[in-house]
């Protein structure tokens, strides 16, 4: 079986993006490895900390999980129009372990929020930048109004259809 690494790019314990990413991972029909960014908490990245103390083990563990996976699903929480600090910190530390930063893995990038834009700003940032950061982005999906459209799965028929197209594309890239 293929291994699919899934996580929500959020440190909220009840993260809606974590819920969406984990559920999406389950729709792929392969082995899924759900991780939680709270298990990778590190000091805020700085070049001085790196020089003085080296790269934390959590960053190395994160990179190893990435390298061992056949594909990656991330759902991004949007904080002030951009990545959460929790995600950016893991990414910054992990990026110091060399290129390609996302290990050339097929990626399905998503976002959701309680509002009608569904985290489209942060998803746009990731979709623009990941292909230049070693991410082989093959699929994307944004879910608006999580509270109305998700209940143990996507409840809106049209949104579910759109999601299914993306998940099929991701599956065939694994
Ligand atoms: C500090 C902060 C900033 C936020 N900024 C945005 C934003 O720019 N756009 C947005 O759609 N929602 C924003 N929200 C609301 C989040 O979309 C909402 O908290 C969502 O649940 C975050 O996803 P999560 O549950 O996966 O952490 C913000 C929330 C917080 C706490």
Image (spheres, helix red, strand yellow):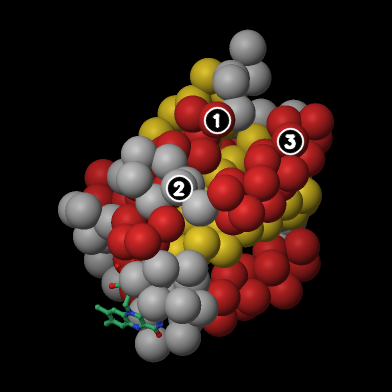
Which label number is shown at residue 155? 2
> In the figure, is residue 130 to the left or right of 147?
right
The x and y percentages for residue 102 are 64, 51
Q: From what the image shows, is residue 41 above or below residue 144?
A: above
Give the quadrant of ligand 1.
bottom left
Dot placed on the residue nearer the N-terminal end, 3 or 1: 1
At 49% from the left edge and 29% from the top edge, which residue is drawn? Answer: 26
The x and y percentages for residue 92 are 48, 66
The x and y percentages for residue 173 are 80, 35
Q: Residues within 10 Å of mark 3 (few under 14, many from 20)?
A: few
- The residues tagged by marks 1 and 2 sit, at their Cα atoms, a distance apart of 14 Å
- The residues tagged by marks 3 and 1 sit, at their Cα atoms, a distance apart of 9 Å
Which label number is shown at residue 27? 1
Quadrant in which the C terminus appears: top right
Question: Which quadrant of the structure image shows residue 33?
Answer: top left
Let me know if residue 45 appears in the view. no
> In the figure, is residue 45 to the left or right of 12?
right
Task: Name the secondary structure under disc 1.
Answer: helix
Most extreme residue toward the front is 157
Of residue 104 and residue 164, the one placed in the foreground of this image is 164
According to the image, label 3 marks what residue? 168
- The residues tagged by marks 2 and 3 sit, at their Cα atoms, a distance apart of 18 Å
Task: Name the secondary structure under disc 2.
Answer: loop
The x and y percentages for residue 17 are 39, 56
Dot placed on the residue nearer the N-terminal end, 1 or 2: 1
Q: Residues within 10 Å of mark 2 (few under 14, many from 20)?
A: few
Label 1 with label 2: CB-CB less than 8 Å: no
């Amino acid at each position: 079986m293929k291994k699919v690494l899934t996580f929500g790019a959020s440190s909220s314990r009840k993260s809606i993006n974590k819920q969406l990413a984990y559920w999406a991972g389950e729709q792929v029909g392969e082995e899924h490895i759900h991780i939680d960014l709270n298990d990778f908490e590190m000091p805020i990245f700085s070049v001085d900390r790196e020089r003085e103390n080296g790269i934390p083990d959590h960053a190395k563990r994160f990179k190893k999980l990435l390298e061992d996976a056949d594909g990656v699903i991330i759902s991004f929480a949007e904080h002030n129009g951009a990545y959460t600090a929790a995600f950016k910190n893991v990414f910054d530390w992990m990026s110091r372990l060399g290129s390609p930063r996302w290990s050339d893995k097929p990626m399905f990038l998503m976002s959701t929020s309680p509002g009608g834009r569904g985290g489209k700003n942060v998803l746009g940032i990731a979709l623009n930048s990941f292909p230049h950061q070693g991410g082989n982005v093959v699929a994307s999906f944004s879910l608006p109004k999580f509270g109305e459209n998700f209940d143990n799965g996507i409840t809106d028929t049209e949104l579910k259809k759109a999601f299914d197209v993306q998940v099929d594309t991701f599956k065939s890239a694994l």
